[in-house]
Image (cartoon, helix red, strand yellow):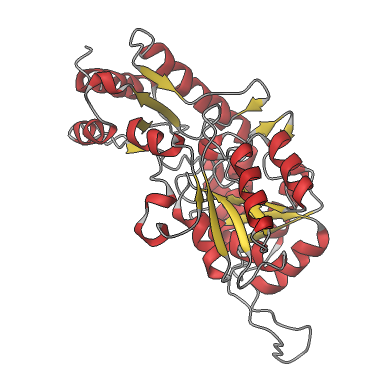
Amino acid sequence: MARIYLSPPSTTESDRDSLLEAFDSNWIAPIGPALAGFEADFVALTGCEAAVGVTSGTAGLHLSLIAAGIGVGDRVAVSTLTFAATVNAIVYVGAEPILIDSDVSSWNMCPHLLREACMWAAADGRPIKAVVPVDLYGQCCDYDAIVSVCEEFGVLIIEDAAEALGARWASKPAGSFGRMGVFSFNGNKIITTSGGGMVVGNSEDIARIRHLATQAREPETYYQHIEVGYNYRLSNLLAALGRSQLQTLPDRIASRTRVNELYRKGFADIPEIGFSPKSSLSEPNYWLSCITLDCSLEVSPHDVCWDLAGHDIEARPLWKPMHRQPVFASQKAFLNGVSDELFAVGLCLPSGSGLTESDQDFVIQSVRKALNRT
């Protein structure tokens, strides 16, 4: 049996044809009609005014912070339960990350702790200027509550929707809740361009990001630069692959939803196994199916990962919180213990759009064996 990966790329003959069509058109340069079309697709998908393709979700976060005027000494609230790239981008611009713990009802940023952080920062004389909530594992944050807090304190939102393409909150699409929203097309995401990302937002901000992403070159016949820019533009070839993949997004979400449902069915008789919660207002894309293991099982997620690896199955604990990472351990954090608990008991299982039922059954049986519940 071939190795079962956590979330491998899922490609089709149509994807290959789209890539070759762009290649044969000789639009090998960084920009071209496929990139312009891909950006237009995201405008239609999110309802935002404009979109710009970039080399990664990280690059998108970096440029979004710059476009929003975030810089040295500014305070930015950010989810502590996330991948390091979210916080790295804040540090890139010289800002100070303020780490916010999770809400037990969603695993995403806790609005109550966000409000507490905003009150503390205001009293300290250096208010929080921006918040970067993360739509974790394909589920949007509680934006009703987060937007309310941000409006109360005059804080702008840059939404890290890297994991949540196609998800919705209260029928509104991921990426559309802040001043800017950022997506990732890394190889393990629900659609991929091998590497790449997209920023959506208002026309003025997106024009600024597009300028910065192309080395901040001024519109002269010669090369003129009045500020530092970046080589962050998504290529036309990769955009052609992304456009093709995006056409099958509903099918991919449906496939991953079925994967989640089969895991729930496969573990239904083990009450010590829990699943990531879902609000009635949430429509996740189920990028990854995540479970929790009750401590009474006396088996940790790390133990199960090693056991599954022995069966050629890739699994992973939930994100290690940023306040537990040595590089960010000294940052101010507002904690309630939820993310620490999730890291201790949480496990991500194979969730690819192309995961077959037979392979998933093998995963389920392997997990049960690791828990002595065969």
Examine the image and state in which quarter residue 163 appears: top right
Examine the image and state in which quarter residue 315 appears: top left
The structure residue drawn at horizontal position 58% and vertical position 67%, both measured from the top left corner, is: 95
The structure residue drawn at horizontal position 77% and vertical position 53%, both measured from the top left corner, is: 154
Q: Specify whether residue 24 is in view.
A: no
Considering only vertical position in the picture, is 321 above or below 92? above
Q: Please, which residue is most extreme toward the front here?
A: 123
Considering only vertical position in the picture, is 174 above or below 22? above
Considering depth in this image, is 221 or 109 the residue closer to the camera? 109
Give the percent coordinates (x, y) of residue 166.
64, 36
The structure residue drawn at horizontal position 66% and vertical position 50%, both measured from the top left corner, is: 118
Q: How many marks do you count on the picture? A: 0
Examine the image and state in which quarter residue 338 appears: top left
Give the percent coordinates (x, y) of residue 90.
56, 63
Quadrant holding the N terminus: top left
Q: Please, which residue is most extreme toward the top here?
A: 269
Considering only vertical position in the picture, is 52 above or below 218? above
Considering depth in this image, is 260 or 144 the residue closer to the camera? 144
Give the percent coordinates (x, y) of residue 93.
58, 70
Q: Specify whether residue 360 is in view.
A: yes
Give the percent coordinates (x, y) of residue 286.
52, 30
Considering depth in this image, is 169 or 30 the residue closer to the camera? 169
Considering only vertical position in the picture, is 44 above or below 355? below
Quadrant holding the C terminus: top left
The structure residue drawn at horizontal position 79% and vertical position 83%, both measured from the top left corner, is: 219
Q: Classify residue 71 as left or right of residue 49.
A: left
Q: Classify residue 206 as left or right of residue 57.
A: right
